[in-house]
Image (spheres, rainbow, N blue to C red):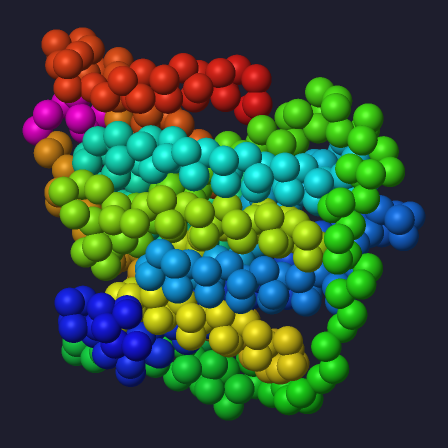
Amino acid sequence: MKKFFQFEELGTNYRREFIGGLTTFLSMAYILVVNPLTLSLQSIPDLPDAMRMDYGAVFVATALAAAIGSLIMGLLAKYPIALAPGMGLNAFFAYTVILTMGISWQSALTGVLVSGLIFIVLTVSGIREKIINAIPAELKYAVGAGIGLFITFIGLQNANIIVNNDAVLVGIGDLTNSSTLLAIFGIIVTVMFMTRGIKGGVFFGIVVTAVAGMLVGVVDTPEKVVDSVPSLEPTFGAALEPLFNDPASLFTVQMLVVVLTFLFVDFFDTAGTLVAVANQANLLKDNKLPRAGKALLADSSATVVGAILGTSTTTSYIESSAGVAAGARSGFASVVTAGFFLLSLFFFPLLEVITAAVTAPALIIVGVLMVSSLGKIDWNKFEVAVPAFLTIIAMPLTYSIATGIAIGFIFYPITMIMKGRMKDIHPIMYFMFIIFVLYFIFLV
């Protein structure tokens, strides 16, 4: 087992990988609650039952998709990167495709399935890997730093330290709120652990914060430990129904937009996540991601599996960086994460303990670790500094990893050409320039 996962080469062990895998699970366990709530449109009253996906079935599909996707990533690509239905994509699935466009959730699942199959073709052909390896090092570092700022912003929001402000967009929240105070306590504790160089400091910060929350009554103690597993029948295989019952409904402009959006966001969110997490774990070699093809195949396969089970696009999770910060370096951590997702099917009541206030400190601290890649960018070269800066700043400000990448990739050829460095631009980057311009024209 140690030889298979290259423990000696990566300087890791079972304990570090287990703590890393568990930390990743705890950091992304919220999806087990958020995804079913989103896809079943629980926040929208007076909807016909036919428009709502079954909450219990989506919960099971979410857990299984995450477990299977993480397992494939761990065993095939051997990366400490976990997968689950993606945030943002699930909101697009529910509120745009189903609620606004009026497309049935079964057809929406078909769109996810088709995008996953296209991804597999692009991955097997090597196109996805070539694109990732063609991205210049400066932009890869910028993507990592931008995602760091983005997830820190999410953590600050989850903790209600940063809140909406109609006058200036964002502002500081109510720091006397009990949940916010718990998150602040968690940040301080985690910073203390990390400053002292304690291995698994992020994980122990989550544990201490959760226990403290229960002691002061901010975090509820679970009423149950084990509960029955809901049925998957309402959603399993529903993605295949439109293919056989109403194939004509799939050949519309609306469905084309749906599939292209799923394709675009997943492609570049995944690319950004893989590069960022691999960079944080020091797994990049010569500015290339080893086994990138296998990692991308794991991601695209998980999307297909998730669609058949009954959930929106399954993708690589940036929260994996929390596991890396806790010590994870190999695919064994992903196998551990997969195991916890399977266990979560039986211990769902315990997930109520892991609130946003508990996980927010982990996201904030991981952001600190990820922006270290800023030091690897040559800010004295303006032609590099501009696209790198725009990539970094656009992610948190637009609340989109993909949009940040798009803006940076548009400006990179422009600044390089004006500097007279046209020959330094990989041909694929010109193609990406055109794609991203069209993206802003037609899809944004």
* Foreground residue among 325 and 339: 339
Image point (47%, 81%), residue name: 210
- The percent position of residue 98, horizontal first and vertical second, equals 76, 39
Task: Write down the quadrant of residue 379 in the picture.
Answer: top left
Give the main secondary structure, helix, strand or loop, of the magenta stretch.
helix
- The percent position of residue 236, horizontal first and vertical second, equals 75, 57
Q: Indicate the quadrant containing the C terminus: top left, top right, bottom left or bottom right.
A: top right
Image point (68%, 65%), residue name: 59
Image point (70%, 44%), residue name: 109
Can see residue 389? no
Can see residue 222? yes
- The percent position of residue 298, horizontal first and vertical second, equals 45, 52
Per the rendered image, the range of residues in magenta is 380-386
Q: With 93 as the anchor, is 84 left or right in this view?
A: left
* Foreground residue among 230 and 34: 230
- The percent position of residue 253, horizontal first and vertical second, equals 71, 20
Q: Is residue 382 magenta?
A: yes
Q: Is residue 393 above or below residue 437?
A: below
Q: Indicate the quadrant containing the N terminus: top left, top right, bottom left or bottom right.
A: bottom left
Task: Write down the quadrant of residue 189 in the picture.
Answer: bottom left
* Foreground residue among 357 and 120: 120
Q: Is residue 8 above or below residue 384?
A: below
